[in-house]
């Protein structure tokens, strides 16, 4: 290491080439320049005293001029800033050099000291001796010698300072490398010899090493598991990317779902807005039809009451006196005239059509006066005009059932999984309900010329939608095949139930026939599901039975008059009795038309128990045996369902027909002794038809009618 050159502590000239001196400002005029004392440690250029200070503080070293500017700025912030108008002093250069000293922690300073101590021992000792020599030389050497040697000493001084700076920079760089290798966390500390350590043997070291190895192995396994997980995640991500890239355009799929969502929301909003108007129109049409039905029913009951009262008065008049006229009030007279007028018109219409086999009393008698008919048609036309305007401001995509189903069909074809997961088959009937009800406003199932369900536009559209799912891969598990049944169950059957409860006249054969046709299509061909109980279906059947019971109780009336009053077939009593009997027989026929839709027990109880045995048989028993009685008995037997007698192994008929069988046997016995003996064969045929074989054989044997034995087919 180079020794520091000797130097005096005389002030340098202003034009010195020293770097520190170049930074000093010239002294102001009139202000004496301060000269550094030989022993000063804070001011002036580095001297022996300055080197002694550095040697005495091993943890402070000079750093390079290009490093530590951040530290310098922070240091200057802590020191008092010099006044701007105060000239720089000669010691400022020392302070400026001091600001470049790198401040490190105590541990780091110790490390730096130890790392540099071995390298600079000789240099520092030489510096110390040189300092002492310089002090002696400064006191014995004359000023002339100092002047002549000044330039040479300054040059050596600059060389020495640069060497010391390079050493300091090298030491700091080596320390930075050591700190970086130790992850910046470990700190080198001095070894304290005063601390005593526990004795360590090989087993303890081995145990610690094994513990450390176990921890490292566990850490390794944990990292290995994480690595495997990350590898699996990468594979999964790659697979997902591949699937997304190979699948259909997800943007288009999202766009389709979004458009479908918007469409359904708009459809629901439209239907919610229109449903109130639909309900009002339905109520208006129902009220109009109900008014008409109540008019017919009330008129029939009033006419029956007035005509029966008139005939009773007439019978009492005949019994008390044969002379005099019967006083009839004006209302009864007007009603009787109206009744006869309508009958005459119907009779003339049948003659023009060639129907000569009609029986009085079997007409529905549902004609309205022309004025009332015009009012009814006008009101009905107004309602139908409102019906047409319900969806006139709505786009076809939101009111046309076919277009609506087409939207859902596209969904089912493109994305069947999401379609079935959304249970669309349960939603479609609810969406179609208002639209179907609009089409049913003009539908009257009590008219023979009413449109059948299968011919309705909504029915065809739903069937096409169901048929289009045949090619679907999920055909077997698809619930779309229940959509039509659900629509019928939720929309059609409740409307039919209203007609049955409030508008249906069981005495009208045309209404009953039309109603049965529609009910058969609904209840048989389009049942909701096998073994599934439909509440609406049960309600409909209960309403049918209840309405027929009410008709039997309110509309069946067959009066009984003395034989003297009915012997003459042209008498009003005989005609009225005949009309009422055929009216009751007509209801009997209409009730049994429900065979196949209602249970046999229900029909037998209602038709045979309540109507035949209570009303019709009594009227037959009071009639004179003859061709008319046989004709009526044939009509009764013709109304009985054939399936009731298909599997009769006991050769006896059903219990509810026992009274009817006894009446047939009595009639046959009376006819066998009268001029109408040939009618006995017809009675035997009736007994055979209703499976009263034992009774027929007994009658033939008792009356020796061997020629009629061939009519009985033995099992």
Image: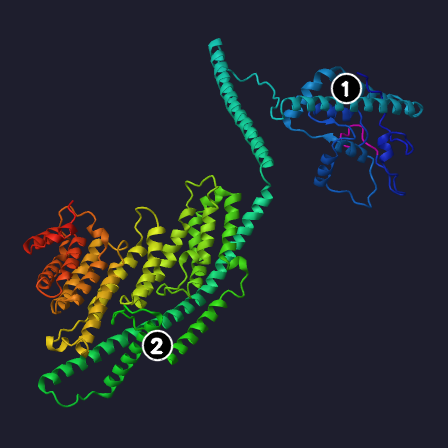
Vertical placement of 65 versus 525: above or below?
A: above
Task: Using the rendered image of the protein, determine whether residue 146 is visible from the camera's viewpoint.
Answer: no
Between disc 2 and disc 1, whose residue precedes? Answer: 1
Quarter of the image containing the C terminus? top left
From the viewer's side, name the closer residue of 283 and 551: 551
- Residue at position x 44%, y 66% from top? 278
Residue 48 is a magenta residue? no
Query: Crowding at label 2, few (<14), some or many (≥20) Cα neighbours within 10 Å?
Result: some
Q: Which residue is mark 2?
A: 368
**Mark 1 residue element:** helix
Tell me the magenta residue range. Answer: 35-42
Q: Residue furthest bottom?
A: 324
On residue 577, the disc is none
From the viewer's side, name the closer residue of 564 and 314: 564
Q: Position of residue 642 (x, y in %)?
A: 23, 53
Q: Position of residue 17 (x, y in %)?
A: 90, 30
Quarter of the image containing the N terminus? top right
Q: Residue 571: name its quadrant.
A: bottom left
Q: Which residue is mark 1?
A: 128
Residue 41 is a magenta residue? yes
Classify residue 712 as left or right of residue 135: left
């Amino acid at each position: 290491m180079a020794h520091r050159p000797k130097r005096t502590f005389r002030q340098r000239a202003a034009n010195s080439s020293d770097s520190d001196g170049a930074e000093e400002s010239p002294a102001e005029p009139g202000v004496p320049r301060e000269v550094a004392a030989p022993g000063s440690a804070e001011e002036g250029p580095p001297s022996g005293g300055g080197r002694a200070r550095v040697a005495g503080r091993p943890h402070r070293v000079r750093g390079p001029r290009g490093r530590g500017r951040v530290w310098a700025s922070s240091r200057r912030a802590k020191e008092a800033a010099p006044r701007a108008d105060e000239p720089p002093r000669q010691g400022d250069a020392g302070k400026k050099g001091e600001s470049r000293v790198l401040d490190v922690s105590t541990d780091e300073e110790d490390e730096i000291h130890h790392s540099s101590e071995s390298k600079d021992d000789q240099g520092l000792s030489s510096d110390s001796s040189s300092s002492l020599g310089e002090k002696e030389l400064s006191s014995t050497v004359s000023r002339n010698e100092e002047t002549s040697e000044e330039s040479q000493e300054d040059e050596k001084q600059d060389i020495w300072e640069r060497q010391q700076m390079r050493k300091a920079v090298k030491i700091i760089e080596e320390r930075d490398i050591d700190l970086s290798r130790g992850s910046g966390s470990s700190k080198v500390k001095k070894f304290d010899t005063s601390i005593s350590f526990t004795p360590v043997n090989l087993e303890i070291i081995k145990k610690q090493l094994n513990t450390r190895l176990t921890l490292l192995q566990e850490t390794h396994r944990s990292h290995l598991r994480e690595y495997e997980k990350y590898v699996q995640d990468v594979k999964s991500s790659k697979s997902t990317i591949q699937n997304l890239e190979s699948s259909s355009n997800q943007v288009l799929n999202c766009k389709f779902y979004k458009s479908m969502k918007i469409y359904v929301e708009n459809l629901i909003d439209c239907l919610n807005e229109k449903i109130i108007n639909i309900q009002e129109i339905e109520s208006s049409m129902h009220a109009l039809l109900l008014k008409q039905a109540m008019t017919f029913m009330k008129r029939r009951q009033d006419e029956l009451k007035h005509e029966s009262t008139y005939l009773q008065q007439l019978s009492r008049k005949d019994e008390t006196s044969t002379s005099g006229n019967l006083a009839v009030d004006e209302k009864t007279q007007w009603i009787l005239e109206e009744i006869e007028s309508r009958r005459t018109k119907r009779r003339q219409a049948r003659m023009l059509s060639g129907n000569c086999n009609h029986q009085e009393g079997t007409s529905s008698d549902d004609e309205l006066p022309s004025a009332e008919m015009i009012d009814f048609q006008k009101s009905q036309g107004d309602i139908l005009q409102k019906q047409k305007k319900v969806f006139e401001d709505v786009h076809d995509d939101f009111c046309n059932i076919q277009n609506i189903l087409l939207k859902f069909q596209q969904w089912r074809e493109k994305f069947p999984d999401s379609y079935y997961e959304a249970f669309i088959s349960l939603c479609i009937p609810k969406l179609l309900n208002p639209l179907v009800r609009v089409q049913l406003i003009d539908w009257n199932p009590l008219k023979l010329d009413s449109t059948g369900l299968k011919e309705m536009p909504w029915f065809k559209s739903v069937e096409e939608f169901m048929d289009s799912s045949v090619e679907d891969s999920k055909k077997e598990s698809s619930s779309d095949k229940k959509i039509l049944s659900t629509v019928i169950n939720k929309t059609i059957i409740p409307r039919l139930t209203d007609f049955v409860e409030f508008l249906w006249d069981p005495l009208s054969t045309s209404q009953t026939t039309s109603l049965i046709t529609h009910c058969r299509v609904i209840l048989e061909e389009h049942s909701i599901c096998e073994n599934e109980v439909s509440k609406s279906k049960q309600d409909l059947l209960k309403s049918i039975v209840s309405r027929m019971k009410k008709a039997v109780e309110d509309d069946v009336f067959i009066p009984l008059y003395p034989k003297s009053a009915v012997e003459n077939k042209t008498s009003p009593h005989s005609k009225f009795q005949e009309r009422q009997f055929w009216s009751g027989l007509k209801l009997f026929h209409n009730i049994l038309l429900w065979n196949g839709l209602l249970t046999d027990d229900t029909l037998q109880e209602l038709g045979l128990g309540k109507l035949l045995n209570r009303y019709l048989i009594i009227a037959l028993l009071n009639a004179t045996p003859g061709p008319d009685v046989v004709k009526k008995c044939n009509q009764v037997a013709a109304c009985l369902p054939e399936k009731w007698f298909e599997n009769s192994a006991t050769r006896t008929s059903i219990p509810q027909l026992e009274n009817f069988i006894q009446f047939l046997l009595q009639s046959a016995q009376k006819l066998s002794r009268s001029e109408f003996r040939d009618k006995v064969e017809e009675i035997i045929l009736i007994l055979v038809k209703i499976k009263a074989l034992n009774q027929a054989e007994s009658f033939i044997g008792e009356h020796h009618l061997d020629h009629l034995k061939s009519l009985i087919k033995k099992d």
